[in-house]
Image: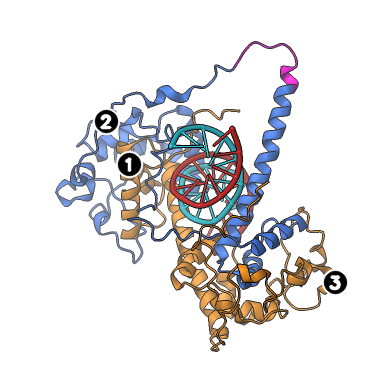
Chain colours: A orange, B blue, C cyan, D red
Amino acid sequence: MPQAPSTRWCPTPEQLMILEEMYRSGVRTPNASQIQQITAHLSYYGKIEGKNVFYWFQNHKARDRQKLRRRLSRQQMQASCTTPQFPLHHLHNLEDINAPSLIPPLSPSHLIFPHLYPQFLHQEGSFVENSRDQGMDLLRNLEGRDCGGGDQEASSSASRLIRSGSYEWVAATMKFETNSGESATCCRSLKTLELFPTKSTGLKDECSTSKSSCTASTNS
Amino acid sequence: MPQAPSTRWCPTPEQLMILEEMYRSGVRTPNASQIQQITAHLSYYGKIEGKNVFYWFQNHKARDRQKLRRRLSRQQMQASCTTPQFPLHHLHNLEDINAPSLIPPLSPSHLIFPHLYPQFLHQEGSFVENSRDQGMDLLRNLEGRDCGGGDQEASSSASRLIRSGSYEWVAATMKFETNSGESATCCRSLKTLELFPTKSTGLKDECSTSKSSCTASTNS
DNA sequence: AAAATATGAATGAAGG
DNA sequence: CCTTCATTCATATTTT
């Protein structure tokens, strides 16, 4: 089904520029009339409808706000992880992974994510929760529990902000994690995964370095 | 601005394996906390951020779905095609869209965004209004006035429905603008932006035609 | 080398 | 406002 001339709006560079400028200027949730006007102005640079403007601000704001949210959760996590950890670069250069290294040689997921498997469910970290009508066979059992489990609570005020959806969370995360250079890791590992040493934080792996590692795709 | 050393994440074989295993197990749309945990765990095998996990599931699910969809549509087509039909491949050659357009050739910003420049600000349209403590420098001038100006009033009863949140407005608008085929532009342009000819309404721009136009994104 | 494909990332659009 | 979906972009990888 050719979906017509893909009718989705796409801002022209000018429109985008203006919108961003406005956003920077403080416009966050324009009301109907504002939207009307903005639309009128922008329409000069290309086809555009009110809803486009509306959505643009909605999305932009949301995605941008998350970053804050995420930042908080992040800091919080770090706070609990701040404890200087030992050097942990030893872990893998991909190749060594196969070697008898210290790394658990790729354990089966039920070993890696015990919380995903009923048998191992006895720790706090619950997982599922919003497992609609999807598979979730393994996860069902967890249902009804407090999703965060232990550390979750730690974030009193933060938990609020954090609890939002994955998307938002991500949106926020992207910005900061990227900047910080390190990903949120350590503390989580502590509580949810005691199977491994928590030194995972400082890994360097960096799959992008050599062009070989990144494969591992479906290749099928 | 070249986007740095292409910092795109790439799952290590282990990470990928785990992710797939989880997916198979039924995990489809992990929420924030879940993502947190997954990320923490996977970070043991290499650098990874929350957004990576998020996107991974997002994409994986989407592509899965897409695959199914395609399959279905194909079957459907076959089903209907079993009966001798006329040739119908002609449909869609969205090529002609690339035709030489009448678009104004991208003038310098002060020409392009007159309304962003003080010199050109003298029209009525109010803008801000709920501009809390935000910037709004450019827009302030417009404050206090009746936003719509002329045609605004035209929509007597409509204004009611519209005036509620922007969302409502959009909800209403979307339907109509979409149907009418033209976006609410001309009239607006007239009053708010008389600097330009109003022909902006019928622009052809059509960013979607070639795969290049829509970019203008971060790519800085 | 060009074409096709796989996939991380981004974002417009909706539903609730 | 939050969450999710569909599309699309960009690029690395594989195919031809």
Horizontal placement of B150 versus B96: left or right? left
Residue B147, position in %: x, y?
Answer: 31, 46
Instruction: State the residue position of label 2.
Output: B198
Choose top left, top right, bottom left or bottom right for residue A10.
Answer: top left
Residue B101, position in %: x, y?
Answer: 31, 26
Disc 1 to disc 3, C-alpha distance: 58 Å
Instruction: State the residue position of label 1.
Output: A42
Identify the residue at horizontal 22%, vertical 34% (top origin).
B196
Taking depth in this image into account, of B178 and A151 the one nearest to the observer is: A151
Main structural element of the magenta stretch: helix, strand or loop?
Answer: loop
Q: Amino acid at mark 1?
A: Leu
Q: Amino acid at mark 3?
A: Gln
Identify the residue at horizontal 79%, vertical 64% (top origin).
A139
Q: Nearer the viewer, mark 1 or mark 3?
A: 3
Residue B67, position in %: x, y?
Answer: 67, 40
Chain letter, disc 2 residue: B
Is residue B169 inside the magenta stretch? no
Q: Amino acid at mark 2?
A: Thr
Instruction: State the residue position of label 3.
Output: A119
Q: Which residues are magenta?
A: B79-88
